[in-house]
Amino acid sequence: MVEEPVLAPPVILGGQVVAGSFQLSFSGPNGQPYRVLASPDVIVPLSNWAVLTITAFGSEPATYTDTSTASRPARFFRAVSP
């Protein structure tokens, strides 16, 4: 039987608006996969959040940039593994 690796939750380092775009910075173990999710409603089930990107952590903190913030209503972001 093969044991699944234990995944550490991503750590949110901060968020900021830069030149009209929203940047979310977060970190996790090198090589661990993560997804960035978004929703206009924070209380909807996680399965209903839009997947914005799927990738893996590197040796440096990750940054996701949402360039469409000016054309959208407010939305919430989450970084999750996997």
Image (tube, helix red, strand yellow):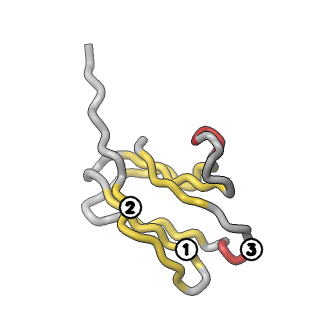
State the residue in front, 30 or 47. Answer: 47
18 with respect to 1 (left or right)? right
Residue type, mark 3 in image: Ser
The residue carrying mark 3 is 71
Where is residue 33? Give x, y as percent.
38, 46
Residue type, mark 1 in image: Phe
Where is 78 relative to 70, above or below?
A: above
Quadrant of the rendered structure where residue 45 is?
top right
Sequence-earlier tag: 2 or 3: 2
- Tell me the element at label 1: strand
User: How far apart are the alpha carbons under marks 3 and 1?
Assistant: 12 Å
Where is 19 relative to 41, above or below?
A: below
Of labels 2 and 1, the one closer to you: 2
Residue type, mark 2 in image: Ile
| Mark 3 neighbour density, 10 Å: few (under 14) some (14–19) many (20 or more) | few
Where is residue 63? Give x, y as percent.
42, 67
User: How far apart are the alpha carbons under marks 2 and 1?
Assistant: 14 Å
Sequence-earlier tag: 3 or 1: 1
The residue carrying mark 2 is 12
52 with respect to 13 (left or right)? right
Q: Which mark is residue 22?
A: 1
